[in-house]
Image (cartoon, helix red, strand yellow):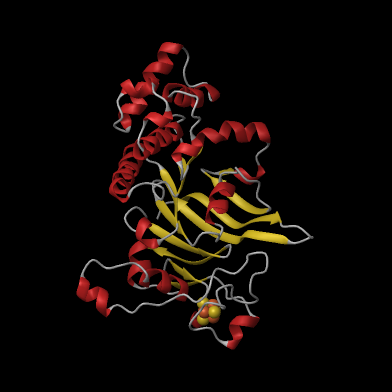
C-alpha cells in the first residue's frame, strides 16, 4: 500500500461559544488519504464534517493537531508559505451560486484564480487557459463571457469545479458538491469528478450528509458524529458489514430499489436529535441515541480501534 498523501492526526477545531463555553466542532480526528484516493466523510448536519474539511486545508486555523499534505506540515506553515501552498489544495463548495461572484464573468472568475498564482503570462494565455478549462468540464469556451446567473445549477457547479482546477491542485475538499443540485444532475457531477480524478490524479476528501451519496465515489468512508470519527473502512466493508450502531442506523435509512428487499429490511430509527455539541454527552457521544447503549457507555468514551484490518470503529461492543 502506498504512503498516505494526506495525513491528519488528532485534529481539533474549537470555537468559543459564549460564557466561557467551547464548541468542539472537531474533537480529535485521525485519517489518511492515499494519492488518487477518495475518502468520503459523512455525517448529519452539525457533526463537524464541513469544519473538518475546512480545517484540513487551513481555511480555518486548527486548534491543535497535525496535518501533512504531500509531505508538507500544513498546520505549521507561515502565512506566505501557506499562500503558495494553497495552489496544491482547493475546495469545491456546496452552493456554487453563493461561492461565485455574481458581478464577475466566468472568464474573470477563472482568470482571477490563474492571476493569484501567476499561472498566465499574458491576456492571450489567460483566455486560452480559461477556454481549455471550460472544455474540460464540457462547458465550451463560448461560455467565458457569461455571468453566473445565466447558468443552471449543474453548470454553475461545473464552473466551481473549473475554478478549483484552474490552479492545478493535487488535493480537493469537495464539500457536499451535489447536495444542492437536482437529483437528475447529481450523477453527472459525480461522474465528472471521478473522470477528472482519473485524468489528473486528484486526491479527494468528499463530504456528504448521507451514505447513499458517497457510495459511488468513495474508496473508503469515514462516519462522523459530534466532532469525532466513529467508523472508517473501505466502502464495501462499511456498507457490507458496518461495525458501529450509528453507521447501521444511517445505512438502514437508505431506500433499497427492490420492494421485497426494502420490505424485509430492518429499519433502525435514530431516537431524538443530534445533541448540542457545546454540551456533548459524557462517555460515548452517541449514547443518548444508541439502541445498544450500556451503563459503561455513559462513563467511558470508547477508543477508536482497528476491529478488522483497515476497518476502524469507536464502540465498547468491540472491546
Ligand atoms: Fe452505543 Fe455504547 Fe457503542 Fe456508544 S459505545 S455506540 S453507546 S454501544
User: In the picture shown, does residue 202 fall above or below 252?
Assistant: above
Q: Nearer the viewer, residue 57 or 16?
A: 16
Q: Nearer the viewer, residue 263 or 248?
A: 263
Residue 261 shown left or right of residue 46 in the figure: left
Where residue 152 sits, quadrant-wise, is top left
- Where does residue 34 sit, x and y in percent of width and height? 43, 50
* Extreme residue toward the front, this view: 149
Which residue is pictured at 55% across the width and 86% down the height?
294
User: In the picture shown, does residue 313 fall above or below 153?
Assistant: below
Which residue is pictured at 44% across the width and 23% down the height?
105
- Where does residue 234 sit, x and y in percent of width and height? 38, 62
Which residue is pictured at 60% across the width and 32% down the height?
83
Which residue is pictured at 30% across the width and 45% down the height?
185
Asked if residue 319 shows in the view, the reply is no
Residue 316 shown left or right of residue 161 in the figure: right
Q: Nearer the viewer, residue 149 or 133?
A: 149
Where residue 157 sits, quadrant-wise, is top left
Where residue 28 sits, quadrant-wise, is bottom right
Quadrant where the N terminus is found in the figure: bottom left
Q: Nearer the viewer, residue 20 or 243?
A: 20
Amino acid at each position: 500500500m502506498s504512503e498516505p498523501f494526506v495525513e491528519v492526526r488528532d485534529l481539533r477545531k474549537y470555537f468559543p461559544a459564549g460564557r466561557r463555553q467551547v464548541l468542539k466542532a472537531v474533537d480529535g480526528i485521525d485519517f489518511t488519504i492515499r494519492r488518487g484516493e477518495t475518502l468520503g466523510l459523512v455525517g448529519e448536519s452539525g457533526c463537524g464534517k464541513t469544519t473538518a474539511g475546512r480545517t484540513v486545508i487551513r481555511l480555518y486555523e486548527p486548534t491543535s493537531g497535525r496535518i501533512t499534505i504531500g509531505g508538507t506540515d500544513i498546520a505549521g506553515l507561515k502565512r506566505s508559505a501557506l499562500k503558495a501552498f494553497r495552489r496544491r489544495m482547493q475546495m469545491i463548495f456546496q452552493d456554487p451560486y453563493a461561492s461565485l461572484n455574481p458581478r464577475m464573468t466566468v472568464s474573470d472568475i477563472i482568470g482571477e484564480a490563474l492571476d493569484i498564482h501567476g499561472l498566465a503570462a499574458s491576456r492571450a494565455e489567460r483566455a486560452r487557459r480559461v477556454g481549455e478549462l471550460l472544455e474540460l468540464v464540457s462547458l465550451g469556451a463560448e461560455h467565458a463571457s457569461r455571468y453566473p446567473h445565466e447558468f443552471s445549477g449543474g453548470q454553475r457547479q461545473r464552473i466551481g469545479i473549473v475554478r478549483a482546477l484552474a490552479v492545478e491542485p493535487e488535493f480537493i475538499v469537495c464539500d457536499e458538491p451535489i447536495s444542492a443540485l437536482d437529483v437528475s444532475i447529481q450523477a453527472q457531477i459525480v461522474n465528472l469528478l471521478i473522470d477528472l480524478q482519473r485524468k489528473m490524479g486528484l486526491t479527494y476528501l468528499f463530504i456528504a450528509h448521507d451514505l447513499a451519496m458517497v457510495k459511488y465515489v468513495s474508496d473508503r468512508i469515514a462516519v462522523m458524529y459530534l466532532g469525532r470519527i466513529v467508523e472508517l473502512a473501505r466502502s464495501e466493508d462499511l456498507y457490507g458489514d458496518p461495525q458501529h450502531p450509528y453507521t447501521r442506523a444511517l445505512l438502514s435509512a437508505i431506500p433499497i430499489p427492490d420492494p421485497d428487499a426494502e420490505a424485509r429490511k430492518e429499519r433502525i430509527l435514530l431516537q431524538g436529535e443530534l445533541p448540542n455539541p457545546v454540551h456533548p454527552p459524557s462517555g460515548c457521544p452517541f449514547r443518548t441515541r444508541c439502541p445498544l447503549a450500556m451503563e459503561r457507555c455513559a462513563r467511558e468514551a470508547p477508543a477508536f480501534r482497528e476491529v478488522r484490518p483497515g476497518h476502524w470503529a469507536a464502540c465498547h461492543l468491540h472491546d
